[in-house]
Amino acid sequence: MDGKVDPPALDQVEPETQKTLVVRLQEFGRRHPTVVASTAVLLFLIILTVAAPYLSSDPLELSPRNRLKAPSTEHWFGTDNMGRDVYSRTLHGGRISLTVGLGVAIIATFIGLVVGLVSGYSRPVDAVMMRFMDGLMAIPEILLAITFVAVTSASIQNVILAIAIPEIPRVARLVRSIVLMIREQPYVEAAVSIGTRLPKMLLRHVLPNTVAPLLVQGTYVFASAVITEALLGFIGAGTPPEIPSWGNIMADGRIYFQMAPWIIFIPGTFLTFAVLSVNVLGDGLRDMLDPRLARQM
Amino acid sequence: MWGYIVRRLLATIPVMGVVAVFVFLLLHLAPGDPAAVVAGSYAMPKDVERIREKLGLNEPIHIQFGKWISNVVQGDLGDSIFSEVPVTRLIAQRIEPTLSLATASILIAIVLAVPLGIVAAWKAGTWIDHGVMVFAVLGFSIPVFVIGYVLMYGFSIKAQIFPVQGFVSIRQGLIPFVRTITLPSIALGVIYAALIARITRASLLEVLGEDYIRTAHAKGLQPRAVLLRHALKNASVPIVTIIGVGIAMLIGGVVVTESVFNIPGLGRLVVDSVLARDYPAIQGLTLMFSAVYLLINLMVDISYTFLDPRIHY
């Protein structure tokens, strides 16, 4: 669980101190090409969206004379039905998608961790909590999210909450199963017998064991949140129209699809690459952190 | 066996209860006055009052919940605010396209994915295996609506093999039905197929490493018999499990697919109800979808006893 892979053959072992950072990165890249490639794609997307104001024009600027123009040197990705530049809308839209993805991953992982730790350690809490989580899990994620956004308002914070809530049970169940497994381990028994108190026990023995699986689960939550956010925007229940997101750009393009497919395909391509790179990163991390599991999947 | 089924059915009741509380509270914890939200921003005070009366919002919240839940138990999900038709009747009117779409997607996914997973596990490490894994990762990452639009662009707008949008009931002829349902069910089925292919491969690979598989080979059985009779049977529990779990994804996908292909089913009803803030309809639909999900997973649990005689209850 500590991220080490099988030790290299004896004749290849050299003192760690002699390796430069570059050499180590190269070795890492050779061992985990998918992690490196997906991280690179993700970083590229993050840089594009963070630097959107410097790389593109105003995403809200209307230009009635340039409606539904196909991609050209002037408008790389064409224009939409109000003459807005799809390139700059897509770059700005990525900020919403990635912010929501990150926000959901952090919130769902944190709350799920707390719920899972408590459930794993307290039987009475566990019984109530898990029924509660079962109920939450039975409601389809997208229904819960769109209902939540519909009854509150579609601000970014509410969209993040709406998507994070249905993700909590999945994280909580994972953490709970790890806790149940760890508490049976001999070293935990030993710690209990020498009088380690519960908070210290959770912090020193249980928490470190959840880090690797949570990191992997977090990437899957991130990917799923990015898709759900786009779905919300696409059906008209996401962030308001003045805040472009990949989903609501595509929603704008729906009725013009036959004339101007780029309004849907451009943000759709970005969306796919974002989700794909995060999913591949998750798979890579899982293989890297838990070689035992890697052989099965 | 029957005792187990009854016990499991009874065990879903508290879970459904939790779902009902969630669904009820979600709409009542909303900031502001639900009646005002429903009435819209141009409503007169007396309209708001009328809606409040109709939704029973003047009563204490536990009384409201009690009345609502006792109606739900009797099969009355209330009336839609906008069409003023019972929600149950709305659901009945819209269920056929959704059932057709879901059934076709599940069939396409299983027929495609299980053999793909088997071949990938059988030829593990070869280019076939890598190809299947690439499909599994890609299929899992491309959002349903992107696949939908790509298919529509290629097969309806460019090649003009299938109609762009809409739905024709099977009662109006098999061929028009197949023509309208093919693209949506492929779009919806891809993510499901990706998931099933991946799990089939993984669980089959695990079984193929077992001692009794080596024994079966050693005693000279046909490789095909070893793969299908000895290995697949023992690998089937996780496959069936993922087919059940995947239903949740399918329900989410239905909402989007029906919007992309303009299919007048339950998914569109969800979107329309949400955009119109038709609270009784949203509550009824969410409850129904959750019940379907729980029932399917109950059926999956029960099927374990048939798939694996070691499991009995």
Image (tube, rainbow, N blue to C red):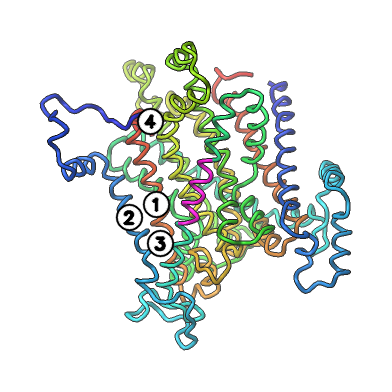
| Secondary structure category for the residue under label 4 | helix
Label 2, on which residue? A41
Residue at the (40%, 61%) spot, across then down: A270
Mark 1 or mark 2: which comes first in sequence? 2
**Three-letter code for the amino acid on which mark 4 is drawn:** Leu
* Image: magenta residue range: A99-110
| Residue B21 belongs to the span the image colors magenta | no
Q: Give me the disc on residue A270.
A: 3
Front position in the image: B3 or B285: B285
Position of residue B64 in the picture relative to residue A157 (left or right) = right
Q: Earlier in the sequence, mark 3 or mark 1?
A: 3
Chain assignment, label 2: A
Along the polypeptide, which appears first: circle 2 or circle 3?
Answer: 2
Say which mark, if any, is on residue A293: 4
Q: Is residue B116 above or below residue A119?
A: below
Left/right of residue B57 with respect to residue A48 in the rendered view: right
Q: Which of label 2 and label 4 is nearer to you?
A: 2
- Kindly indicate whether the residue at mark 2 contacts the one at mark 1 (C-beta within 8 angstroms): yes
Q: Chain of mark 4?
A: A
Chain of the residue displaying label 3: A
Residue A276, disc: 1
Depth check: give the residue in front, B163 or A283. A283
Residue B140 at x, y = what percent?
45, 48
User: Is A27 in front, or is A68?
Assistant: A27
Which amino acid type is shown beneath numbered disc 3?
Phe
